[in-house]
Image (tube, rainbow, N blue to C red):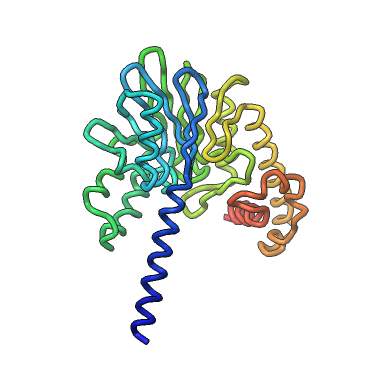
Amino acid sequence: MKKKLLFFALSIGLLTTFSVRSQEKEVTISVDTLSQNTYMLTGQGGNIGIYVGETHVFMIDDQFERLSEKLKKAISGLTDKPIAFLFNTHMHGDHSGGNARFNSETVTLVAQDKVRERLKLGLMKKVEANEMSQGDYINMLPEVTFSEDITFYDGDETIMAFHVHNAHTDGDAMVYFMENNVLHMGDTYFKGRYPYIDLKSGGSIDGFIKAQKKALMVINEETKIIPGHGRPSNAAELRNSIAMLEDIRAKIQAQIDAGSSLEEVKMNATLTADYDSKNGTGFINSERIREIIYTSLKK
């Protein structure tokens, strides 16, 4: 009996390992050229922004650790210039999971203050559980942080990064390449799908909408937008996102004012019916977005 149990356990372990390795092999890193110097990399997780400057590369987000070598290979296909700055738009693992694999003596990791704070709290638990080395823990953490905004200069290019409050999380930042006219919005924008708003990490529906409106104040009709998830976008599509979220928020607020419970709102498909076919098939379905917005408004 013990031998059978051992064989079963080993089999499960092998299957799990095979499954993870298969997923890695299946992930393909695709590249979208947005301007002469800026690119969007898509793999598994949040979209990555790459700016090739005069002497170095400015990278935004890095997806999961297991994809780091694939991402490095994809970047080397664009340029042989070294990465000098790695910017985290927020702390979630599908955007910051590769930090330790990219961070080095020649790379400076940059993020908003809250990103470092939240990464420290989460990653220290892994160190204490012997799931992460002390060295990787240190390399996962941003070395330069800012409160509201920070600016980088590279030849004729000005790179503006600015904090947006309590949107997807409490540490979100967008990055705008002025000369190339490209904006990376991180997870404050999910194109073609309902957004995930991390309420436990300081996110809110009101802050999410405000963040998207702030982005509109920065860009113009020709701006290329890198969303946190989804295909490259533009100002017109971002305006549609704002209109959708404001409409759903107003409908759910009316239900709250009328005394509806969370369960009633979750089950009320009419509240999002106008948008479900185009936006409700992603990670966040229609019932979940109603739950998120209701909970956010009730706080």
Q: Is residue 207 visible?
A: yes
Q: Front-most of 132 and 25?
A: 25
Determine the residue positioned at 49% across, 37% down. 42
Quarter holding the N terminus? bottom left
Residue 246 lies, in percent from the top left, at 68, 41
Q: Is residue 10 above or below residue 185?
A: below
Determine the residue positioned at 62% across, 27% down. 235
On screen, residue 131 versus residue 115, left or right, reads left
Quarter holding the C terminus? bottom right
On screen, residue 182 versus residue 237, left or right, reads left
Q: Is residue 229 above or below residue 232?
A: below
Which image quarter: residue 128? bottom left
Q: Is residue 96 above or below residue 16?
A: above
Which image quarter: residue 175? top left
Residue found at the far top of this picture:
156
On screen, residue 292 versus residue 3, left or right, reads right
Q: Front-most of 52 and 163?
A: 52
Q: Front-most of 121 and 60?
A: 60
Residue 237 lies, in percent from the top left, at 65, 31
Determine the residue positioned at 44% across, 46% down. 94
Q: Is residue 164 visible?
A: no
Q: How many marks?
A: 0
Determine the residue positioned at 38% across, 81% down. 4
On screen, residue 159 versus residue 225, left or right, reads left
Q: Is residue 274 above or below residue 151?
A: below
Residue 122 lies, in percent from the top left, at 35, 54
